[in-house]
Image (tube, grey):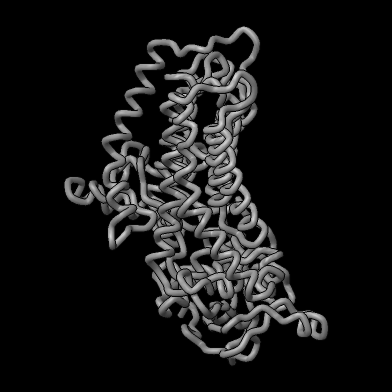
């Protein structure tokens, strides 16, 4: 690291720009496939209704809505599709590195387009876009806009801002856990979490069946990775004052790279044992911001200094972050720490965190339809990701985000059945094709059921003996009807 230019962080920039762009592609693809049945003109929570509600009282209600293109351009499903395809195309160009071959303002405009385009979607996404990794991607996209192009090294201030983002993400999550449920302090959290997490993966059951001592070690490792390691991400800053050796990387940069490796290792374990959309993958990409190389990876003939106009722009971004980061700093050390909170309308310098408490039991809502008026022919609808069929092994979907499946996990927490869920059942009664496409199987093959209902069960992973003898992946008990049955009439 050399003053204003992070000359040893060419590789970090390559991973950041291409990795963040790839995540935007996944996010826009997820939106393209799911937004219309969930939030479109005929969705479960129609976004046009939200926009009309804001338009009726723009002075007071407008402050509740973050910036979005659809405040100026009326929402239609076709315009949403056009925005998604534009985001996918721009993202793929950035993954290929084409805009980065031009002057730095070209990739800047590309990333700002992704940033504002996706924020336009999350702003009207309501509960289906209320996840922390949405605002994480938005903020990462904004910072990626100022990493520059292949003609110059990345600006030091922007690389440091990526460390600050990763610090808030990891340290904030660690503090949420320490302040949260007792299970994180007595080291028992991961004796439950692999089984009760929102959407298990194919290896979650094997992880759950590991010995008790291993789960305690997981929690200790998590605390170390989130509460201790993040401070060492800033070690390369010492390279500005500590003389570097003649050959090889400086020791401050080695410390930063080791800290990044710890973060990457813990996130890969989470990738193997769960489905957390792009949260883990985004954290891995951000961790590469602290990975320097023993020699610059600059193309031959490129300059090692930043143009004056680019230095002014990136310095202004640094000053902006000094101002907007103060609420996030206070939140990290507040007794009532906010989790996944934004302190400004542009979703910059946010607070992050997840799973401050861990549920001890897995309650699943199973949706059933009936093919006759007498209530005898009940059949289950199968979701793509959430547990249902006892023999089916969960699939790996992350970094793709199954929004309906995730929200189904929240329903049993307090047995609160939201308005969107009631409308979801109505769409099933109508045999709405767009809604049925969100599911894995339709037991009525496009025909309308006579009635639907919601039934809750307690799900547990099958033991090794149950798996061997009965061939099941899950065991369920405690059946209870929580809504219905009812029909369209």
Q: Is residue 24 visible?
A: no
- 59 to the left or right of 35: left
Residue 133 in picture, x, y percent from top left: 48, 50
Q: Tell whether 158 sits left or right of 320.
A: right
Q: Where's residue 170, x and y in %?
A: 47, 51
In the rendered image, the vertical position of residue 66 relative to residue 14, given as above or below: below
Q: Quadrant of the C terminus?
A: bottom left
Pick whichever, 69 or 112, lies toward us: 112
Q: Quadrant of residue 214?
A: bottom right
Give 246 or 87, whichever is nearer the viewer. Answer: 246
Residue occupying the point 29% across, 62% down: 336
The residue that appears at 70% across and 80% down in the rendered structure is 462
**Residue most extreme to the top:** 301
| Residue beneath the point at 46% across and 22% down | 155
**Residue 448: percent from the left, percent from the top?**
59, 73
Of 2 and 42, the residue lying toward us = 2
Q: Which residue is drawn at 39% across and 11% down?
A: 308
Which of these two is toward me, 109 or 424? 109
Query: Relative to residue 365, is residue 59 drawn left or right?
Result: left
Residue 178 quadrant: bottom left
Vertical placement of residue 169 versus 139, above or below: below
């Amino acid at each position: 690291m050399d003053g204003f230019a992070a000359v040893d962080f060419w590789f970090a920039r390559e991973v950041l720009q291409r990795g963040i762009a790839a995540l935007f592609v996944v996010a826009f693809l997820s939106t393209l496939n799911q937004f219309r049945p969930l939030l479109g003109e005929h969705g479960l929570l129609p976004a046009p209704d939200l926009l009309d509600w804001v338009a009726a009282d723009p002075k007071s209600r407008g402050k509740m809505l973050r910036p979005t293109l659809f405040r100026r351009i009326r929402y239609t499903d076709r315009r949403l599709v056009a925005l998604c395809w534009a985001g996918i195309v721009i993202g793929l160009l950035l993954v290929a590195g084409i805009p980065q071959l031009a002057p730095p303002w070209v990739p800047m405009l590309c990333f700002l387009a992704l940033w504002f385009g996706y924020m336009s979607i999350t702003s009207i996404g309501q509960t289906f876009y209320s996840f922390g990794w949405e605002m994480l991607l938005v903020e990462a996209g904004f910072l990626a806009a100022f990493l520059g192009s292949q003609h110059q090294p990345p600006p030091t201030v922007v690389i440091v801002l990526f460390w600050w983002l990763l610090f808030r993400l990891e340290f904030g999550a660690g503090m949420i856990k320490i302040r949260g449920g007792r299970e994180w302090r007595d080291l028992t959290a991961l004796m439950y979490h692999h089984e009760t997490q929102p959407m298990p993966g194919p290896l979650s059951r094997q992880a759950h069946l590991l010995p008790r001592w291993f789960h305690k070690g997981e929690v200790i490792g998590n605390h170390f990775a989130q509460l201790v390691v993040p401070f060492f991400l800033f070690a390369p800053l010492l390279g500005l004052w500590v003389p570097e050796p003649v050959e090889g990387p400086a020791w401050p940069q080695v410390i930063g790279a080791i800290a990044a490796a710890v973060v990457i290792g813990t996130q890969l374990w989470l990738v193997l044992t769960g489905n957390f959309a792009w949260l883990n993958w985004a954290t891995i990409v951000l961790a590469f911001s602290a990975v320097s190389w023993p020699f610059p990876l600059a193309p031959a003939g490129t300059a090692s200094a930043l143009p004056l106009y680019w230095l002014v722009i990136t310095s202004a971004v640094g000053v902006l972050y000094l101002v907007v980061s103060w609420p996030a700093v206070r939140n990290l050390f507040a007794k009532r720490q906010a989790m996944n909170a934004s302190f400004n309308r542009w979703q910059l310098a946010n607070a992050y965190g997840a799973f401050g408490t861990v549920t001890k039991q897995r309650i699943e809502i199973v949706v059933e339809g009936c093919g006759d008026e007498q209530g005898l022919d009940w059949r289950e609808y199968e979701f793509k990701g959430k547990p249902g069929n006892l023999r089916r092994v969960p699939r790996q979907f992350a970094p793709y985000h199954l929004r309906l499946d995730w929200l189904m996990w929240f329903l049993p927490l307090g047995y609160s059945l939201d308005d969107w869920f009631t409308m979801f059942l109505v769409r099933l009664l109508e045999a709405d094709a767009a809604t049925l496409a969100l599911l894995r199987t339709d037991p009525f093959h496009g025909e309308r059921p006579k009635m639907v209902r919601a039934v809750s069960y307690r799900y547990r992973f099958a033991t090794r003996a149950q798996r061997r003898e009965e061939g099941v992946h899950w065991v369920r008990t405690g059946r209870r009807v929580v809504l219905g049955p009812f029909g369209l009439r």
